[in-house]
Amino acid sequence: MLCLLIFLCNFVYTLLNIQHLINRNNMRNIFSLEGKNAWITGACYGIGFSIAKAFAEAGIKNIIFNCRSEEAMQRGLDSYHEAGIENVKGYVCDVTDEQAVKELVGKIHAEVGQIDILVNNAGIIKRIPMHEMKREEFQQVIDIDLVGPFICSAAVVPEMMERREGKIINVCSMMSELGRETVSAYAAAKGGLKMLTRNICSEYGEYNIQCNGIGPGYVATPQTAPLRERQADGSRHPFDSFICAKTPAGRWLNPEEIGGPAVFLASHASDAVNGHILYVDGGILAYIGKQP
Ligand code: NAP
Ligand code: GCO
């Protein structure tokens, strides 16, 4: 009788496993994020918020986000609720504060559960000519845009290693590949983030952890608002015209356009993609620019 019971349990377990693998490999389901928890750093607004909305539409179980102030976090929660997203938890945590990040990861594990997907989205930029930039200004950009992703990734990887499964997505930039005036710290950070992405891929691929980057082009968010401001005479900002001439579609990208590629990199559809920087730039990197 006991042998029969053990046989039946094994038989049911095998059937459930086969069903799970069939579901995972069904093209309709492969992009699903059902049952997954995603922590998106700095997703109170901007690109991170749009990635979170896309994850919600892909069936995510829980969205976790953080930013640096209670006020911004509450504003972010209101935005999620206005978008109809209720399975969301916000925390106040600065990604450069290693102890705070470690405590936050422990809190997420206790209050929400495992972190299946980490999106290192939090970032700042300072637009100052290099020879005028103070060392502490350069350091602050490096700390948030490069050291922060290191701190958050190092905090989530041990649990992903135990489960032998995980997704890390680093939000890179055109400046992971190109330079321009006044953004030396940002380009150094985002170039480093590209290589951190490749190194996490190299070091943890054997644990079935995929680490990829997303490289958005020029996206209309608060971070780039100064580059799109109307001039005193009502004309377009020179940089606005410049970027539209450098983008084949002749326009700035919308934050929502980053969501689909992020869902791809967060889902089982990308299990064989690792160490890749997926540029979502409307073709900027392929284009010499509109002829005058
Ligand atoms: P954004 O609108 O300025 O949003 C940045 C987010 O990061 C905010 O929620 C901000 O929250 C948070 N943040 C900043 N420093 C933080 C810290 N130390 N700890 C925790 N949260 C922090 O910027 P965005 O345009 O959405 O950009 C998001 C990411 O995409 C950045 O990494 C950026 O470099 C990158 N990116 C942007 C573009 C673009 O054209 N917009 C293109 C390529 C890449 P609080 O300040 O309220 O804490
Ligand atoms: C800038 C912009 C860019 C974008 C983005 C481009 O001043 O050049 O802010 O850096 O934010 O990173 O991919």
Image (cartoon, rainbow, N blue to C red):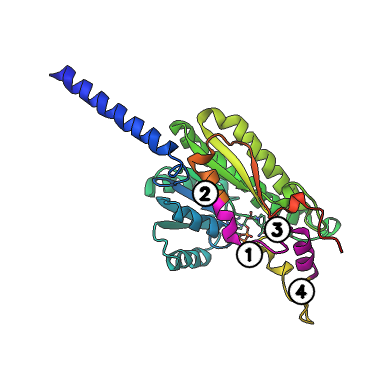
Q: Is residue 112 visible?
A: yes
Give the spatial CA distance, label 3 vs label 4: 22 Å
Report which residue position mark 4 lands on. Answer: 236
Say whether residue 175 is left or right of residue 274. right
Give the residue number, with chain letter if any, for mark 1.
221
Instruction: Tell me the distance, in whole angstroms, between the alpha carbons under discs 2 and 4.
Output: 34 Å
Residue 48 shown in magenta: no
Q: Residue at x 49, y 44 (%)?
A: 117
Q: Is residue 272 above or below residue 239?
A: above
Residue at figure coordinates x 78%, y 49% from the top left: 178
For label 1, being within 8 Å of ligand 1 is answered: yes
Disc 2 secondary structure class: helix
Quadrant of the snapshot with the N terminus: top left
Is any atom of residue 43 visible in this view?
A: no
Q: Is residue 38 left or right of residue 19?
A: right
Q: Earlier in the sequence, mark 3 or mark 4?
A: 3
Residue under numbered circle 2: 263
Callout in the foreground (3, 2): 2
Label annotation for residue 252: none
